[in-house]
Image (cartoon, helix red, strand yellow):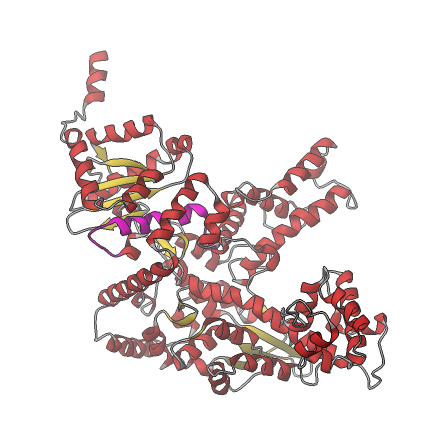
Amino acid sequence: MRIINKNRFSVFNLEDTNGRSGAYYTSLIVYLSILNNMQNETSKSWTWGAYPNLTQYNFYKRVASSNEFKNRDTNKIKNFKKGVAVKNLQNKFLTGKLKKDSELLKFLDKNIEQRSRHYTSNLVKLGLVDGQRIVTPVGKSLLSANGTKEISRSKLENNISIADNSLIILRQLAKFKVNKINYNKETDKTKVCMYSPFNFLIAALLKKSSIEEGLLFKSLSALTPYNQVNITDYIKKITSKFGIKNIHDYNVALYKEQIKHFGDDNSLLDKKNFLENIAFKNRKSGKMEELYYNFYKSNRAFAKCHTQDNLDKLLIIVNGKGKNEIKKRFNGNKNIFMLKGKNSRELNVFLKNNAENEFISKGNSNNFYVDAAIINTREVNIDEYHKSFEKLTKIGSVITSNEGIVSLTFPKFWKAIDKKYPFNKHIFETKELSSNLQENTIFSDFQTDITLEKIFSLSEKAVQEVLEVYLKSYGHKTEKEIKEEQLKEQNKVLLEKLKVIMPQKRLLKLLPLFIERDDNKILRYTTKDATVPTIFEWIVAIGWYYLSKNKYNLKKSMQLSLDTDGYPITQAPGQKNKDEVGAGDIIAKYKDRTVQLEATLMDKNAIKRGEWEPVLRHSANLSAASSVPVQTYFVTSKTDKNTENIWRSVAATDIEETGNKHRESRVIIYPVDIVTFKHWIETKGIDEVKIWEKIDKSYAPLVNTKFDNKWKQEILNEIG
């Protein structure tokens, strides 16, 4: 319930294009964590602003030093610091006394503060922070969910197998509205027209269980509260062979009688009159506006008089440096003309190839360019902006995608809710409120942590009726049995997806890239929505599954959140008492044994500092809590002899768990480099049983050694 359309033609967008990062969800959490830490550290009241306020500068400084920016350009902050130091202005800068018109402050605003505003704008759009970048209750819940604290769930929410962070994103999508707000001074009332993309998505997929992905999300993004349509007819058209035309027809109807056309005089316009029309405005560049005019003038000349000279002049512009901008503004990113073959630029061949091209048949009309620019600009925005909502629905486990066809992840769940909250009747809604109210007041729930019951205004009685329908659809199984069934189904779907996105051959080709740390290739061949260390953990989990003779639930073994395409997003959140149950990266449970895998890409020296303690702790906790034997394999690019020998020697020592019971156990930790791990996967005859047996045999003498837990006190007694 956060976005007000700037005008009737705007397309809602949940991702600032200037604040984009490959690892979308990870970036959200990094930025949110930094803001939360900054606010927790300040003793004064928080304000977000440009210099002399230092919050935007300090935010960017922290982002630039985070792991998120490890492989990104941080020269802007370095150059600014250098500029301040060279002129010996550190004290003046930190005390807010730099001159407002100084070149340093202009650089600060354009290259640092502006980036801070862009990076955090996505958090505002999702309700995770407010306009002042103060972390909201729902933002704090998301941070908790990405730690070790479980979020509070309702009766309904307890009946679906969904990660805590995914549930929070799902809730925000369910609350999200595109709003048209008008205040009437005479009546002192505020009229709010709302459009819910989430309700449209659920309604469409309940009407037809599977729909082409791009078409569905483009159709969803095209809608606006300024032009409400018959939803039943609109959904019907989406699923027909005229789906794309349906979007175009909607846009035409949206602009009907709203476009400012030129007058009846159809003579050639001069640049000033042409560019006065909003259809040709470009906020970022006056050069682009001049390009639009040159294209108009040249195309109009050719449309009026088909000569080789006019064609040559036109093609110079259409195929010049600004060709992509012309395509984007006037033809929905598609080529203006068909140019195929050696003689395609010759007049007769060109006219034959483009016989039905509207830029030729209608290009002599001034208003043709107005219609083309406005309609196509919106359609280009739809094509670009729909991806952000689509991405979030996958993170929120709302939809599952299979080869470009989407369906609901929990269809029975949404079908049951639909009985008491018909989604198709809540796509467009209007309400009238007393006095002049701002959007944050009208929709204050967007920033608060509320459950699906409250979002859909379901009473206790309605919830009970929904649950009766839902449980009946599962043959009246228990909550636990339903979630187990869902988890089995999710695992089955994941394994099918992995056959396509990460078969064994592709995985084996990828593994060496982690040794080389060729991050660009890794991201290109997997996903740009996760960090490379997270992707490595995912790859290790899949690799171990491939080498295992005895199969298990792969999805359950991963301590990762996956999107519904099967790709990783981030480490799994919200596991209560995580350390007491193991908390290793991957836990493969077999009938008579458990294998824990720890995966890291830290360098060999960093392993000593950063991984000794957590690996030992995870191994001790899992070994103490498990009723079957446990082995831990540490998979990394490289280890040194000291690390290997220390971990081996641990097997001869009693290790105390860090949980409440403080039980002691012996742990087996075996280091594995990526080269060895790859060899295991690709070599016939090597599986988890053989690996286990050989390691167990080697470690047995150490494990069976009697350890004297009183050794320290005995030394002290001897000393006296």
Residue 713 is situated, as x and y percent measured from the top left of the image, at 21, 21
**Closer to the camera, 135 or 6?**
6
Query: What secondary structure do most residues of the magenta stretch adopt?
Result: helix
Q: Is residue 80 above or below residue 347?
A: above
Q: Nearer the viewer, residue 424 or 506?
A: 506
Q: Is residue 662 left or right of residue 605?
A: left
- Asked if residue 217 is positioned above or below residue 522 in the image, the reply reads below
Q: Is residue 10 magenta?
A: no
Location of residue 325 by image quarter: bottom right
Q: Position of residue 643 (x, y in %)?
A: 33, 29
Residue 496 x, y percent position in the rendering? 32, 63
Q: Residue at x 43, y 66 (%)?
A: 171
Q: Is residue 2 visible?
A: no
Q: Is residue 20 left or right of residue 690?
A: right
Query: Residue shown at 69%/45% (left/top)?
Result: 108
Residue 309 in which image quadrant: bottom right
Mark yes or no: residue 24 visible: yes
Q: Is residue 459 left or right of residue 218?
A: left
Q: Residue furthest top?
A: 719
Counting from the top left corner in percent of width and height, residue 512 is at 40, 42
The residue furthest front is 342
Query: What is the number of callouts on the image?
Result: 0
| Quadrant holding the C terminus | top left
Q: Is residue 613 above or below residue 152?
A: above
Q: Nearer the viewer, residue 268 or 481?
A: 268
- Please tell me which residue lies in front, 687 or 13: 687
Q: Which residues are magenta?
A: 529-553
